[in-house]
Image (cartoon, coloured by chain):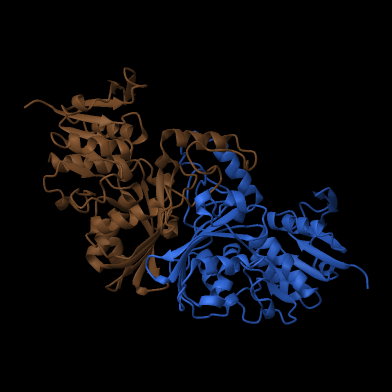
Chain colours: A brown, B blue
C-alpha cells in the first residue's frame, strides 16, 4: 500500500493553511494535494518551508484522494461532498451536513464513538467545538440541565483577509469612521463589538448562535437540552473566548473537584489561578491545541447547581483545523 | 442668590472632563471650580474652548462649593466625602459609599425617589448604570426573577491614558508580545479579551462583577434578586456592551410590546432592526446619552418567561458623568 493521498480543498484559506501546518508538523507519511480556485491554480503555496503547487479543483482528480478535507463554502460542500464520499473519506468544515442525522458531527475528544465507518463526516462550528471540549466532561459528571453562552469571537472566523483588514483599520485608527464599509464584517470591527455573525433566523437568533445550540446538543447526544447563545465578534485575532453559565442536574459541591476533572483532560488547560491573574485569554490560547478554561465559580443564580466559566481556544485549531485533523486520525488510527 | 458654585475633583480625568463638557453644553449659569492634583494645579484645562485654571484640592476651599463632584479614587471619597457633605451636596463617582444603606445610589431615570434630601449621593458603576436603564422598565412590567450578564467593557473604564495606551499598542501591533506589561490593564489589551476588572473577591467573582450584583439590586429595590455577572475588558474605546439573559416572573407574550415599552423611554434607544443590521454597538453608542438596546428575542431556556438582549452605552456618559450630572439636576430641579 502506498502513501495515503490527502486532498485539501481551500488550502490557501486560514483553515486550509492551518491544516497543512498540522500535517507538516506531525510529519505524517502522506501525499498532500492542495486544491485552490482556478485563479490561484498553478501558483506555489509555501507552508513551513515546504512548497505545494496549487491544483485547480477537479472532482475526478479529487476522487483519487483517500481523504478530502473541504475547507470551503457550504455550497461547494453540498455539491461535491456526497459525490466524493462515494470513494473517499470526506471531512467537511462547512455547516452543510452538520445537522443531517445520517452524518456524524465529531469532536474527537468528546464523541469519537459517533464515527462508525461513515465516509462523510462533519467538522463543527468553531465556537461549538471550543465549548464542547470543556462541556463534555462536566456533562458526564454533573449532567447539564441548561446552558447560556455569550461569545467573544475573533476576526479569524471571517478568514485571513478579515484579520488583515482589522489590523490595518486599527493601525490607521484616528476616530470612529461610521462611513467605513468592511469587506468582511457587517460593521467596522476596529475598537468595536458586533453582535451579529452569520444570518438572522426566524427566531431572531443568528445562525451562528443556533449552530451552537444544534451542535452542542448533537455532540453531547442531548437533543432536548435547552441552550441559548449570543454570538459576538470582537477585535481579537484568532482565538475565541466564551462566557458560560451552566445549570446542572447534580450539585457541584467542590470547585477543586471541577478543576481536577478538567485538568485530567489533555484537551483542556485549566487556567484558574486568580491570585496570579491567570485565566483564559485570546493572547494566551492562540496557537495552543488545548482549550483554556478558568474563572470557575459557583453560579449566583443556581448556587451549587450551577457554574460560571470562561473559556478561550484557538479558532483555527480546536475551532477548525485541529478538530478536522483529529477526525482524520480517528478514521485512520 | 448668586450663581451655584460647582466643584469637580478630578477634573482632568476622563469622567471629570466629560462632566465639564456637559455643564458647558447645557450652558448652566454656574461657577465651576476644577480641582486637580498638586502636580497639575495652576495649569489651564481647556474644554470646549473654555479655560479653567486648575485649583489644588483643598477641603476648606471645596467646602465653599454648593455641589462637589468626586471623580477620584474611593480612598479620596472616603476621606473627604462625609466631611464635605456637611455643607455641600457631594456626588461621589467612586464605589466608596454605594453599598452604605444610608447613602442613596441613584440612576435618575430609574430611582429618582431614592433622593430624599441627602447631601452625600453615590453614582453607580458604569456597567450597572447602563444595564439599569434598560432593566428598570422591564422589571416594572414583567418582574425580573433572575439575571445573567456578560460584559464587553471598553478601555475608558481605566481612564484616558488607558485608551491612549490601547490605541498606541494596536497601532504598533506586529504579533502578540507576551512580555508587554500594560500600565493600566492586567494584561495587554491589544487584540485581546481580559476577564478581570477590579479585585477578585472571596467568592471568586471580581469586585466589578459584584458591583453589578449589589447595585442592580439596590437601585431596583430588589435586595434578594439572584444576579450573576462576568465582567470582561475588550479592546473598545469608550462604550461598553452587555449580553443579558433575563428570567421574568410574568410571561413576555410579545416582542413588539417589549420594543414599544423600551422605545417609550427617552433614556433608551431601541436598535433592533435586524433585517438592516441594526443593533447596539460601541461604535454607534459612543457620545450618545441614551443606552442602545437590541437583539431582543425570547430565551431558548425560559421560553416566553425569558428574554435575551444586547445593550451598549457610552461608559463616560450614562456610565459615569451624565448620570452624575442628572443627579445634580435632580437635587437642583
Above-or-below relation of A139 to A88: below
- Looking at the image, which is closer to me, A260 or A190? A190
Which of the 4 quarters of the picture holds residue A119?
top left
The answer to whether A311 appears left or right of B223 in the picture is left
Which of the 4 quarters of the picture holds residue A145?
bottom left
The answer to whether B210 appears left or right of A203 in the picture is right
**Can residue A252 be seen here?**
yes
If the image is split into quadrants, where does the C terminus of chain B sit? Answer: bottom right
Which of the 4 quarters of the picture holds residue A85?
top left
Q: Position of residue A214 (x, y in %)?
A: 30, 56
> Residue at point 81% right, 54% down?
B41
Above-or-below relation of B223 to A252: below
The answer to whether B149 appears left or right of A173 in the picture is left
- Looking at the image, which is closer to me, A271 or B213? B213
**Can residue B277 be seen here?**
no
If the image is split into quadrants, where does the N terminus of chain B sit? Answer: bottom right
Q: Position of residue B123 (x, y in %)?
A: 66, 69
In the orientation shown, which residue stands out farthest toward the top? A42
Q: Position of residue A236 (x, y in %)?
A: 47, 44
In the orientation shown, which residue stands out farthest toward the right? B1
The answer to whether B251 appears left or right of B257 in the picture is left
Number of labels in the image equals 0
> Residue at point 62% right, 40% down?
A179
> Residue at point 84% right, 59% down?
B27
Amino acid at each position: 500500500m502506498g502513501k495515503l493521498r490527502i486532498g485539501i480543498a481551500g488550502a490557501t484559506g486560514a483553515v486550509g493553511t492551518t491544516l497543512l501546518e498540522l500535517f507538516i508538523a506531525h510529519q505524517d507519511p502522506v501525499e498532500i494535494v492542495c486544491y485552490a480556485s482556478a485563479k490561484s491554480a498553478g501558483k506555489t503555496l509555501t507552508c513551513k518551508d515546504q512548497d505545494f503547487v496549487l491544483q485547480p479543483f477537479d472532482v475526478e482528480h479529487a476522487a483519487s484522494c483517500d481523504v478530502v478535507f473541504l475547507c470551503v463554502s457550504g455550497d461547494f460542500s453540498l455539491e461535491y461532498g456526497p459525490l466524493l464520499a462515494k470513494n473517499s473519506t470526506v471531512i467537511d468544515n462547512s455547516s452543510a451536513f452538520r445537522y443531517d442525522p445520517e452524518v456524524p458531527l465529531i469532536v474527537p475528544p468528546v464523541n469519537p464513538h459517533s464515527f462508525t465507518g461513515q465516509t462523510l463526516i462533519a467538522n463543527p462550528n468553531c465556537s461549538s467545538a471550543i465549548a464542547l471540549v470543556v462541556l463534555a466532561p462536566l456533562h458526564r459528571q454533573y449532567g447539564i440541565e441548561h446552558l447560556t453562552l455569550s461569545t467573544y469571537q475573533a476576526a479569524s472566523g471571517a478568514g485571513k483577509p478579515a484579520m488583515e483588514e482589522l489590523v490595518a483599520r486599527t493601525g490607521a485608527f484616528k476616530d470612529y469612521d461610521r462611513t467605513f464599509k468592511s469587506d468582511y464584517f457587517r460593521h467596522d470591527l476596529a475598537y468595536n463589538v458586533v453582535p451579529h455573525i452569520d444570518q438572522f433566523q426566524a427566531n431572531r437568533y443568528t445562525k451562528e448562535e443556533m449552530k451552537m445550540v444544534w451542535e452542542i446538543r448533537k455532540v453531547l447526544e442531548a437533543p432536548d437540552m435547552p441552550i441559548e447563545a449570543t454570538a459576538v465578534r470582537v477585535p481579537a485575532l484568532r482565538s475565541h473566548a466564551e462566557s458560560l453559565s451552566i445549570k446542572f442536574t447534580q450539585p457541584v459541591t467542590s470547585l477543586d473537584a471541577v478543576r481536577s476533572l478538567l485538568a485530567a483532560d489533555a484537551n483542556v488547560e485549566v487556567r484558574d489561578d486568580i491570585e496570579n491573574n491567570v485565566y483564559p485569554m485570546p493572547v494566551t490560547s492562540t496557537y495552543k491545541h488545548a482549550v483554556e478554561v478558568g474563572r470557575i465559580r459557583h453560579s449566583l443564580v443556581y448556587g451549587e447547581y450551577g457554574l460560571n466559566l470562561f473559556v478561550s481556544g484557538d479558532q483555527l485549531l480546536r475551532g477548525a483545523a485541529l478538530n478536522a485533523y483529529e477526525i482524520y486520525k480517528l478514521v485512520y488510527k
